[in-house]
Amino acid sequence: MTKLDTIRIMNAVDIIIKKRNGAELSRTEIDDFINGITAGTIPDYQAAAWLMAVYFQGMTDRETTDLTLAMAASGEQLDLHDVLPGTVIVDKHSSGGVGDKTTLAVGPIVAACGLPVGKMSGRGLSFSGGTIDKLESIRGWSAEVSEAHFRRQLRAIGLVVAAQTADLAPADKILYALRDVTGTVPSLPLIAGSIMSKKLAAGADAIVLDVKCGRGAFMETLTDAQALARQMVAIGTLAGRKVTALITQMEQPLGLAVGNALEVQEAIAALHGCGPADFQELVEVVAGEMLLIAGAASDLGNAREQVSAVIDNGHAFVRFCDFVASQGGDPALVEHPERLPAAPLVIAVPAPSGGYVHALDAREVGLVTLDLGGGRQKKGDLIDPAVGVVLAAKVGSTVNAGETLCTVHAASRAAADAAIPRLQAAYTIATQPAAPLPILLDRVTG
């Protein structure tokens, strides 16, 4: 060990103690600590101790912003302003949920309105499907594009969805892996910093955050979702970005389809203006917010008019076709979504009793889809793009005993038989009427 390494480790101890005692760290101290983690000069056990100190003592908005900027600066940072000079680069992020295929429809709509959307996305893990997994159900489509291709496609089409590179916010990857095994995942500053570091490194000027709230989301209560939303908006504002956070319902799945190819079909329907009501509404709300925050609309009413126009005239759908083809996908599957991968068995799930649907457990529907093969239990698992669940009844629906609650799209009869009782149990049916769930719960701005 060199003398410099010894000094760095001693400084790391001082920083850990300072945060353990509840004091506010300076930007220099945070930069030094993150640089040490990235360079490997601060060992995992010290990084873990610091994470635990942050977990218990929290961070101020200024500290959290400095942490976010340090993680963003730990690797490659995209600057896309030379691609389309003078144009605001806009992005969206969803905290993940069951049936959340919003990016697939929002991206083409916003691009068709004239705003470029250059997006780095990830794959799903556990019951939340990833955007890339859904798009890969389109034969030939690939998220692996070079930076030159990324820039060329953004300039020509205005829409790119690419896999997150290994060089994007590497400090976040190190810290996230440690958080996962040290019991420090549920820390608002660490969650917000992790999400926002990747958004800032990816070069967006304006960001709309879709923070899911409910049984099928990481944040199960509105209070927790609001706290996370405020934290991320504060980070973006202090970092000089325009950020709006929408808190949206995830007690039940979004839309009707859960499963990769099934969700692509539903996103295509939304681009034609005929998606399920809750999904169509969320798509148009998020797209409108992106136009507004980027300064491309005078108010939300004008933004929604623009969104409706590109759906009605078909420009959004054409943009999606061009996007798919540019990344190697077969556009014929977009034009004829019935040709997307389909499960060999489609079996109806009957209602065990009649009445009104009062609740539908989004998490259980997601876990059923996972066990059908539509998600991965661990990194590297293969996904069956064809399997999933399509809902026929949601909260507020009236059902009779024996009527179809949903359909299971399965690879085998055994898999379908295992799914049916779980899906029946995911529904709460009562004798009193129930109101449909609202999609938008809150809106947080800078």
Image (spheres, grey):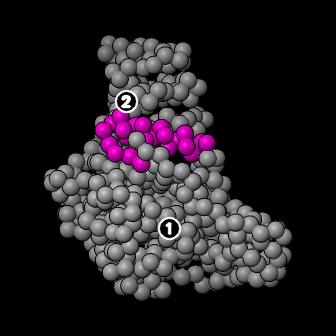
Residue 195, compared with residue 343, is above or below; it is: above
The answer to whether residue 237 is magenta is yes
**Quarter assignment of residue 186:** top right
SS state under label 2: helix
**Quarter assignment of residue 69:** top left
Which one is in front, 327 or 215?
A: 215
SS state under label 1: helix
Q: Position of residue 249 (x, y in %)?
A: 59, 57
Q: Position of residue 21 (x, y in %)?
A: 54, 15
What residue is at 47 percent from the left and 26 percent from the top?
Answer: 60
What residue is at 40 percent from the left and 41 percent from the top?
Answer: 446
Can residue 140 be seen from the camera position used here?
Answer: no
What residue is at 49 percent from the left and 34 percent from the top?
Answer: 189
**Residue 3 in the figure: left or right of residue 134:** left
| Amino acid bearing label 1 | Glu
The residue pinned by badge 2 equals 66
Residue 366, compared with residue 201, is above or below; it is: below
**Residue 233 - label:** none
| Amino acid bearing label 2 | Asp
* Residues rendered magenta in the picture: 223-244
Q: Position of residue 283 (x, y in %)?
A: 45, 66
What residue is at 22 percent from the left and 52 percent from the top?
Answer: 80
The residue pinned by badge 1 equals 281
Can residue 308 be seen from the camera position used here?
Answer: yes
Tag 1: Cα neighbours inside 10 Å, few (<14), some, or many (≥20)?
Answer: some
Residue 383, compared with residue 174, is above or below; it is: below
